[in-house]
Image (spheres, rainbow, N blue to C red):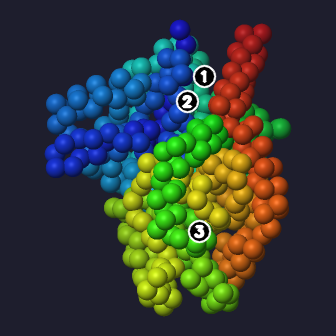
Amino acid sequence: MSRTIIVSNRLPTKVQRTASVLSFTPSEGGLATGLGSIYKSDDNVWVGWPGLSIEGEDEQQHVVEQLHADSMRPVFLTDAEIKGFYEGFSNETLWPTFHYFSQYAVYDLTQWETYRAVNEKFCHAVLELAGPDDTIWVHDYQLLLLPQMLRKARPESSIGFFLHIPFPSYELLRVIPWSKELLEGMLGADLIGFHTFGYMRHFLSAVSHLLGATSQNGIVELGNRSVVVDSFPMGIDYEKYATTAASEEAAGHIRQYREALQEVRVILSIDRLDYTKGIAERLKAYDLLLQRHPEWRGKVTLLMVVVPSRDQVAQYQSLKEEIDELVGRINAAYSSITWTPIQYFYRSYPLEELSALYRLADVALVTPMRDGMNLVAKEFVASKEGQQGVLILSERAGAARELSDALIINPTDTIQLAEVMHEALTMPEEEQVQRMESMQALVRQYNVHHWVELFMNRLFYSKNKQLTLATA
Ligand code: G6P
């Protein structure tokens, strides 16, 4: 029977070690939360890294067994691989460059070589598992070389690739010394998917400039084979978010939070700690709101959840310090005995508590500098079913292409953002409901199930068309 083998760097479950005991918790980030609820259907398997260096054989065996029961196959990475491949080339070269932060990017030959070696390691893990009829679906920037490696080993396999982050303009990509190899790696797939048409356009232009390959209507011709390139905006598990937010458990949390917050209005901000998310700019804009509209002092609170992420990478450590400092300064400047302007939480939350926060919030601030899609925006919309609420959304998040009923802002323009927060807090109820309902209709229809179906059907048809042409 044919299965789908999902491959991503991070598994949807992460293993953590506390005082030598291993625990298993859900992973953070768009990819894991987005696909996590559906991959278990049929006989599908998810191959990826469990998020921790596990070297002892007994421990590895324990992790294999635990994850196996949940249809996952771990790929173990050594400390040196975590440093060179994950913290290094993935998150110090590709992540900043693809998000237009090339001033943070490093170009290090050893890290590049480790990146290639770890992609090979993933390739072996998949080949051990995949039968000739299985479909292999590779995800994200950590595994850009994998489609081509798989193609060499299994020329007939059906291979899809999806990039969850932006694809940058060719001018940025070309700065990476290994940009050609990266493009060739991706082109090993039969189908390459992006969240937006803009990312797809950048990719096709890079392929033409750097590799001289021509394309027509999104089909790249490589001589002996062709690759289909298209945009597939990722959705969320709408029902899961709508139902959890309306559950008794969430209602219990909401009552508790409301009691503590009293009458104040709530602006919510939830992100992984990342410089692409615009967290510092958001804080500066909130400071401006309190300066320009002093009537909100004592009447609004910013609930800011920052989920720890990549804390071994230098840029993330200094961003943490900057955020701590800004929150401290704003709170010290405006707090009163009975009111705290910013309530700041540096940790992750289980779904029920997150849903309660979404439900409680009057306004959600999703203002990244760059973001492939941003599923938090969609989760907020789904959690607000039957309720009012306002979404403020950055024009540079992929989600802005779809959620045009949000208040769309330029995240660098802190004055505009402060004024839009004021507008959101004073928006008539009727307008809030109207905007929310139209976004809900869209997020409900184009949910994650729809996304998977669309991608898989397209992969099936592009592959079959090629096979027919090859045998004709
Ligand atoms: C983004 C990326 C994912 C990644 C996630 C969390 O959503 O697109 O590939 O897994 O961030 O980051 P981490 O480095 O913790 O896996």
Question: Which residue position is annotated with label 3?
Answer: 266
**Residue 1's spot in the image, x, y percent?**
53, 8
Three-letter amino acid code at disc 3? Val
**Residue 190's spot in the image, x, y percent?**
65, 29
Mark drawn on residue 78:
none
Three-letter amino acid code at disc 1? Ser
- Mark 3 or mark 2: name the one nearer the start of the chain: 2
Three-letter amino acid code at disc 2? Ile
Mark 1–mark 2 Cα distance, whole angstroms, equals 20 Å
**Residue 278's spot in the image, x, y percent?**
57, 69
- Which residue is painted at 32% across and 39% down in the image? 24
Mark 3–mark 2 Cα distance, whole angstroms, equals 32 Å
Cβ–Cβ under 8 Å for marks 1 and 2: no
Does residue 216 lie above or below 379 as drawn? above
Q: Residues within 10 Å of mark 2 (few under 14, many from 20)?
A: some
Q: Is residue 403 left or right of residue 128?
A: right
The foreground one among 466 and 198 is: 198
Q: Is residue 372 visible?
A: no
**Residue 451's spot in the image, x, y percent?**
68, 35
- Mark 3 or mark 1: name the one nearer the start of the chain: 1
Question: Which residue position is annotated with label 1?
Answer: 158
Mark 3 or 1: the one toward you: 3
What secondary structure is found at the residue carrying circle 2? loop
- Which residue is painted at 81% across and 49% down in the image? 438
Question: Which residue position is annotated with label 2?
Answer: 38
Does residue 303 lie above or below 90 as drawn? below
- Mark 1 or mark 2: name the one nearer the start of the chain: 2
Mark 3–mark 1 Cα distance, whole angstroms, equals 48 Å
Ligand 1 lies under 8 Å from the Cβ of mark 2: no
